[in-house]
């Protein structure tokens, strides 16, 4: 259980937390991780998401430090093999009686990792993270809306990349700039019509990890859980934050 702490200066807190997240294990471990079947570092994608979220927040008169913090947290819930790796972890948790939803796993992992790096989690930021990782489509905090939009945009772009022969760098740049433009024009966070049109031509994909890799993930999780300090779930958090090349 992470202890939540109040702070006196809210603006200073998010300014400092922004720097703290860039120095955290969860953020820097993204450099070695990529979606299953690809070799493109997730860190590059999430740096773009952070930049996009900050630009949109400033244009809309929102708290850019808070928005960038939320964007980085949203993207940092990324274990080895990305989305496919998350599916294996959730299956492992169910089979081992650790009943936790993915939303709760994501938020708790982020708070655990940030706390391990010496960062303070306030009750307000905890509430924002709950909304960020929650299932509700009725998001009330504008900074959370922007962070979620930017993270989901990156996921959409990765889907398009896998189904397209378009130059990936050009696509990433053009599509993120289109989202920024649409948000500024609308005066609020909105999806890109161009991205939605491109997605409509792509069939849904269901990428599963091969059996050998799945067994290796289970073995690694067994080790992390066995040697976890405190609750067993802490071992799962430690596994999620481990560099992919070390597994």
Image: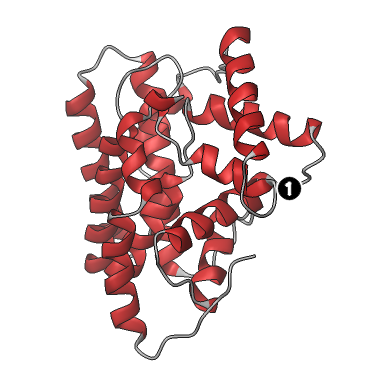
Q: Is residue 198 visible?
A: no
Q: Is residue 147 above or below residue 8?
A: above
Instruction: Tell me what residue is drawn at x 36 percent, y 52 percent.
Output: 72
* Residue reaching furthest to the bottom: 8
> Where's residue 75, x and y in %?
41, 45
- Quick one: quadrant of the N terminus? bottom right
Callout 1: SS: loop
Rendered residue at 69%/52% (across/down): 231
Nearest the camera: 209 or 93? Answer: 93
Residue 10 percent across, percent down from the top left: 37, 84
Along the line of sight, which residue is nearer the eye, 123 or 145? 123
Q: Is residue 145 left or right of residue 65?
A: right
- Taking 167 as reference, is 69 left or right? right
Residue 94 locus on image (x, y percent):
78, 35
Q: Residue at x 40, y 66 (%)?
A: 118
In the image, taking residue 70 as reference, residue 185 lies left or right, namely left
Tell me the residue at 35%/69% (across/down). Answer: 66
Could you tell whether 222 is left or right of 23 in the image?
Answer: right
> How many numbered marks does the figure carry?
1
Report whether residue 66 is seen: yes
**Placement of 171 over or under 122, stated as above or below:** above
Image position, residue 192 (x, y; %): 35, 43
Q: Is 126 drawn above or below residue 234 in the view shown? A: below
| Badge 1: residue crowd in 10 Å (few <14, some 14–19, many ≥20) | few
Which residue in the protein does label 1 denote? 100
């Amino acid at each position: 259980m992470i202890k939540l702490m109040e702070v006196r200066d809210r603006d200073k807190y998010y300014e400092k937390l922004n720097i703290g997240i860039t120095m955290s294990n969860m953020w820097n471990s993204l450099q070695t991780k990529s979606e299953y079947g690809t070799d493109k570092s997730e860190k590059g994608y999430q740096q773009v998401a952070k930049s996009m979220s900050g630009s949109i927040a400033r244009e809309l008169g929102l708290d850019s430090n808070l928005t960038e913090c939320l964007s980085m947290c949203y993207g940092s819930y990324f274990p080895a093999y990305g989305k496919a790796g998350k599916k294996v972890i959730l299956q492992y948790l169910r089979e081992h009686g650790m009943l936790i939803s993915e939303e709760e796993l994501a938020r708790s992992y982020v708070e655990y990792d940030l706390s391990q790096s010496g960062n303070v989690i306030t009750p307000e930021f905890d509430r924002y993270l709950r909304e960020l990782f929650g299932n509700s489509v009725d998001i009330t905090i504008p900074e959370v809306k922007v962070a979620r939009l930017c993270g989901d945009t990156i996921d959409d772009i990765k889907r398009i990349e896998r189904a397209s022969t378009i130059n990936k760098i050009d696509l990433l740049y053009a599509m993120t700039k289109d989202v920024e433009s649409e948000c500024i024009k609308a005066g609020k966070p909105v999806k890109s019509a161009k991205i939605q049109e491109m997605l409509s031509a792509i069939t849904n994909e269901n990428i599963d990890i091969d059996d050998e890799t799945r067994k290796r993930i289970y073995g690694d999780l067994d080790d992390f859980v066995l040697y976890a300090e405190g609750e067993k779930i802490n071992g799962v958090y430690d596994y999620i934050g481990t560099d992919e090349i070390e597994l």
